[in-house]
Image (cartoon, helix red, strand yellow):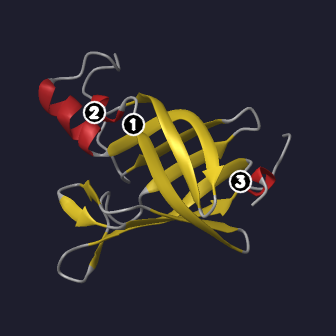
């Protein structure tokens, strides 16, 4: 697969995890938003967040209360680093992440393209207390210089 199909910005269409009960669950709820970017220099960035996240009471983003910070962390997921293609998967090498446990890890995503959409799926993972295979569907963002 040529890397050129990956390059650019992608907006989240859906993120769901197959639970042990045979149902699909949405870790960040319905209306979750996300942005995924693959750059030609071999770096990637992913950010996902729940809809309608509450504001902190103060205006300093680094001085939220413990409860505000906990809520913010539980409703947001992000990481970035280098990426490489291997047969039917793209591997993200995590260099920075909201969750320190992922630093230095390799996040494997199986991929397929469906017209203007990129479908990424994981090996079994735990997200929001759910164990299963996650599927993320992304829509290519058309380039606009304005």
Sequence-earlier tag: 3 or 1:
3
Q: Disc 2 vs disc 1: Cβ atoms closer than 8 Å?
A: yes
Q: Residue at x 73, y 74 (%)?
A: 115
Image height of 89 relative to 21, above or below: above
Q: Distance between the residues labelled 3 and 1?
A: 21 Å
Dot 3 alpha-carbon crowd within 10 angstroms: few under 14, some 14 to 19, many 20 or more:
some
Point out residue 41 in the picture as x, y percentages from the top left corner.
Answer: 74, 32
Which secondary structure lies at badge 2? helix
For disc 1, the marked residue is 105
For disc 3, the marked residue is 6
Q: Disc 3 vs disc 2: Cβ atoms closer than 8 Å?
A: no
Which corner quadrant of the image does residue 17 belong to? bottom left
Which secondary structure lies at badge 1? loop
Q: How far apart are marks 3 and 2 (CA)?
A: 26 Å
Which corner quadrant of the image does residue 105 belong to? top left
Dot 2 alpha-carbon crowd within 10 angstroms: few under 14, some 14 to 19, many 20 or more:
few
Which corner quadrant of the image does residue 131 belong to? bottom left
Q: Residue at x 35, y 43 (%)?
A: 76
For disc 2, the marked residue is 101
Q: Nearer the viewer, mark 3 or mark 1?
A: 1
> The N terminus lies in which quarter of the figure?
bottom right
Q: Residue at x 60, y 64 (%)?
A: 88
Horizontally, residue 40 falls left or right of residue 80, namely right
Which secondary structure lies at badge 3? loop
Image height of 121 relative to 50, above or below: below
Dot 1 alpha-carbon crowd within 10 angstroms: few under 14, some 14 to 19, many 20 or more:
few
Q: How far apart are marks 2 and 1 (CA)?
A: 8 Å
Point out residue 144 in the picture as x, y percentages from the top left corner.
Answer: 83, 47
Front-lying residue, 51 or 136: 136
């Amino acid at each position: 697969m040529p890397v050129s199909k990956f390059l650019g910005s992608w907006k989240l269409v859906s993120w769901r995890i197959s639970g042990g009960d045979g149902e699909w669950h949405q870790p960040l709820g319905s209306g979750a938003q996300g942005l995924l970017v693959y750059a030609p220099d071999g770096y990637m960035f992913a950010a996902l967040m729940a809809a309608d996240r509450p504001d902190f009471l103060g205006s300093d983003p680094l001085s939220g209360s413990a409860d505000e910070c906990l809520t913010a962390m539980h409703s947001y997921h992000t990481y970035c680093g280098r990426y490489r293609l291997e047969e039917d998967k793209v591997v993200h090498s995590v260099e920075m992440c909201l969750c320190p446990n992922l630093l230095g890890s390799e996040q494997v995503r199986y991929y397929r393209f469906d017209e203007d959409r990129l479908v990424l799926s994981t090996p079994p993972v735990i997200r929001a207390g759910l164990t299963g295979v996650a599927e993320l569907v992304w829509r290519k963002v058309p380039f606009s210089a304005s």
